[in-house]
Amino acid sequence: MTGTKLRLDHEHCRLLLKQMLRIRRFEERCAELYTKEKIRGFLHLYIGEEAVATGIMQALDEEDAVVATYREHGHALLRGVPAGEIMAEMYGKQEGCSRGRGGSMHLFHEPTRFYGGNAIVGGGLPMAVGLALADKMQGKSNVTVCFFGEGAAAEGEFHESLNLAALWDLPVLFVCENNLYAMGTALDLSESETDIHAKAASYKMLSEIVDGMNVVDVEVAARRAVASIREGDGPVFLECRTYRFRAHSMFDPELYREKQEVKKWTEIGPIRRFQSWALEAGELSQADVDAIEEEVAQEVSEAVAFAEAGTWEPVADLLRDVGAEART
Amino acid sequence: MSTKMTYREAMREAIREAMIADEKVFLMGEDVGHYGGCYAVSKGLLDEFGPDRIRDTPLSESGFTGAGIGAALGGMRPIVEIMTCNFALLALDQIMNTAATMRHMSGGQFHVPVVIRMATGAGRQLAAQHSHSLEGWFAHIPGLRILAPATVADARAMLARALEDPDPVLIFENALLYNREGAVPDNLAAIDIDHASIRREGSDISLITYGGSLWKCMDAAEELSSLGVSAEVLDLRTLRPLDDAAIMASVAKTRRVLIVDEGWRSGSLSAEIMTRIMEQGFWTLDAPPMRLCSAEVPIPYAKHMEEAALPQVATIVETTRKLVGA
Ligand SMILES: Cc1ncc(C[n+]2csc(CCOP(=O)(O)OP(=O)(O)O)c2C)c(N)n1
């Protein structure tokens, strides 16, 4: 299903709800495991923003490439990286999708062209441009999707990348996940122009705002964007307005925003909103929702079991994968 | 059999040859196309290969270096040209945080076969922002291979091998070498780029160097020989990984060593080489190892001051004489 038309039938509603719930339940478990010290390091949760990754991923084909940031569990999961491998990565086990070398912030997966996992704000954008350049030069019709936060818009690499992509008509879908805060710095404290999509438009690419709390809106916009990119019409920029319900990371005391504000956003949360709409519209029944929850819970507990059963890479392998095996 | 050409022509021929041999190879960088390359290395290539493969970029070092890295990940074989290593600092994030780390962070799944070329070195009165030698800094980074061709033959041969490497390779071309003429053997495959090379045999001292300083060491060795001192000159060629075996073998033979490096002294590549000699070759030494580096100052504009800041033939000769007691 790669057209721009969206049929919100039973099957599709089920799929969208399930994908969002997979992210939500997986990450809730991650938070729990973090407090139990099974997961260490930085852990950035995506809870509240699920509609963005879910809608965008619907528009991709197998051969497309995905570049993400350190808040990428949801993107990896929906791109098709096995949940067990993601969880094992967070445990640091060698069965993890990056062999335990990356952790939460550096998920990678070659079979699904998932290129991370970048913890340098703005750092993934030039790489996405290059992946798209390679596809274009090789005559492939693939699209590279690049996810990043609104904080990246202040970095030079954001501007360099948008300029290059537009200048060279490259097949990149830029997805700005504007959750209003870069750690604790609100957007209006860091940008003179707070409409991020306007910056992209200034580089002469198609650019629009999307309600990032509405999975259907995101999917429709993504399908339209991807279709236009595949037509050869150059890059597209989507600014998805969203909100993260949790702290920036597990270390964040959240001194920068009011509880009331968070509450206001959770009330229009993407899952709550879509689920009640689907129930009201009769596309899903409570029994459907319960069944989805059941399937998701099963997947998450299997992922945890996989991670628990994982093994530690021998320290003798420490220097492995720094470069290719030495030349003779 | 061999052919005479300049270092610049050798680089250009190497790029041409690589582009003809593999459609996936392309060159990108600032002014590589319409301008003809800021050191004229890529002059004429735009006409031959077109703007898709000789790709002019905006002034966005981080953006286009990162794009080269992404293109390499995506199956192409990009050669990224950065005008000078001074400007490579704007791309340091991409080189270090993406190219050098990708293989490791992805648990071996992704690797970045990109080649990044840049000019390095002082001596043209271009002052502090165009004259630095930062290859030693880059040689600090695991995950990269650092090459410093000093001879025309190496300039001709190294690129193809760099393009075969599955990991990121940085080539530092000392800007003073571009006009240098030399012979290139017709059998390029015979040129070994993975090991250091003894450019002149000697028995009294090892002069260990690379890049632009090689020729200063060769001239110094010539002068020293008329003073009865036999200096061996070892050209490192590859700054990462260092060829420890060649370094230790030379030191074991001559028992004295002077390292000549255009980088600043503190925390320099020469400091690393010296440490390795102390760790591995201490008992073979007859005198304390010494080094000549650039003075610890941003490279000045005025000619006499710039000269004073750099290792020179006279200082190499003088230091060697002290070391060997001649
Ligand atoms: C280049 C760089 N500078 C600073 C940081 C530290 N840092 C990590 S996340 C973050 C905020 C990023 O905000 P945004 O891009 O909006 O993404 P979000 O976390 O909201 O998804 C900062 C400043 C970093 N990782 N990289």
Image (cartoon, rainbow, N blue to C red):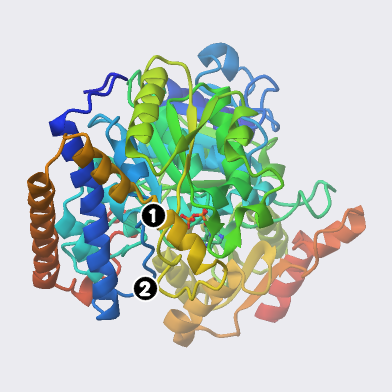
The residue drawn where x is 51% and y is 61% is A261
* Callout 1 crowding tier (Cα within 10 Å): few <14, some 14–19, many ≥20: few
- The image shows residue B8 at horizontal and vertical percentages of 63, 32
* Callout 2 crowding tier (Cα within 10 Å): few <14, some 14–19, many ≥20: some
**One can see residue B149 in this view:** no
* Dot 1: chain letter: A
Task: Report, in whole angstroms, how far the alpha carbon at label 1 lies from the one at label 2.
Answer: 30 Å
The residue drawn where x is 59% and y is 56% is B135
Quadrant of the frame with the C terminus of chain B: bottom right
Q: Secondary structure at mark 2?
A: loop
- The image shows residue B62 at horizontal and vertical percentages of 58, 44
The residue drawn where x is 49% and y is 56% is A120
Image quadrant where residue B178 sits = top right
In this picture, is B316 found above or below B176? below
- The image shows residue B282 at horizontal and vertical percentages of 48, 85
Image quadrant where residue B218 sits = bottom right
Q: Is residue B97 left or right of residue A20?
A: right
Q: Is residue B98 left or right of residue A41?
A: right
Nearer to me, A109 or B270 = A109
Label 1 amino acid? Glu
Q: Secondary structure at mark 1?
A: helix
Q: Which residue is mark 1?
A: A267
In this picture, is A319 found above or below A283? below
Q: In this rendering, do the residues under marks 1 and 2 share a single chain?
A: yes
Q: In the image, is the residue at mark 1 within 8 Å of ligand 1 by its beta carbon?
A: no
- The image shows residue B154 at horizontal and vertical percentages of 51, 42
Label 2 amino acid? Gly
* Dot 2: chain letter: A
Choose mark 1 or mark 2, whichever is in front. 1
Q: Which residue is mark 2?
A: A41
In this picture, is A45 found above or below B183? below
Q: Is residue A71 left or right of residue A1?
A: right
